[in-house]
Image (cartoon, rainbow, N blue to C red):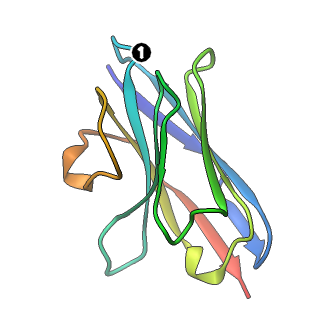
Amino acid sequence: QVQLVESGGGSVEAGGSLTLSCMISGFTTSVIYVEWFRQVPGKEREGVAAIITSSGITYYADSVRGRFTISRDNAKGSVSLQMNSLKPEDTATYYCAARSGIWAGLRSSEEFGYWGQGTQVIVSS
């Protein structure tokens, strides 16, 4: 079965960096759309970055463009989110989600059936 396992969250001061990793297994296709979401209590999950594993095409939310970089290592079956110049407003629980196929732009969380367990990112001012 499909599994997504995240790692790499933690606490950092504003301006610092963190890298999140999502290990993906169980898909029968190599064409996978992976999106990182984040959520704070009381708010909906927000998509921040996405990548198509077969092509490497990426999408970013305006709030993170230029600071976050999503990448994939198909040999390892992983997708990473490098987060630089972190701000207190980046504090959230981060989730990776995946679906097969090619999709354009950031997608709604309702479109995903496979999710990681979430990893917390805390950015202090």
**Farthest residue, direction bottom:** 125
88 vs 12: above or below: below
The quadrant in which residue 99 appears is top left
Q: Describe residue 17's horizontal placement relative to residue 97 as left or right.
A: right
**Screen quadrant of the C terminus:** bottom right
Residue depicted at x 65% and y 62%: 66
User: Which residue is at the far top?
Assistant: 28
Q: For the residue marked with disc 1, what is the amino acid?
A: Ser
Answer with left or right where residue 57 lies relative to residue 46.
Answer: right
Q: Which residue is mark 1?
A: 30
Spot occupied by residue 45 in the image (x, y as percentages of width and height) = 34, 65
Q: Is residue 62 visible?
A: yes
Residue 101: name its quadrant. top left
Q: Could you say where residue 24 lies in the image, as x and y percent from the top left?
A: 48, 27
Q: Is residue 112 left or right of residue 60?
A: left
Label 1 CA crowd tier, 10 Å (few <14, some 14–19, many 20+): few
Q: Is residue 117 visible?
A: no
What residue is rendered at 55% in x and 22% in y? 77
In this view, the residue in front, 67 or 99, is 67
Q: Could you say whether the residue bearing mark 1 is in a helix, strand or loop? A: loop
Observer-nearest of 71 and 116: 71
Q: Is residue 82 above or below residue 53?
A: below
- Who's the residue at 48% across and 27% down the image? 53
Q: Considering the image in quadrants, where does the N terminus appear?
A: top left
Count of numbered circles in the view: 1
In front here: 69 or 27?
Answer: 69
Residue ID at (19%, 52%): 110
Camera-nearest residue between 64 and 76: 64
In the rendered image, residue 41, in percent from the top left (x then y), is placed at 38, 78
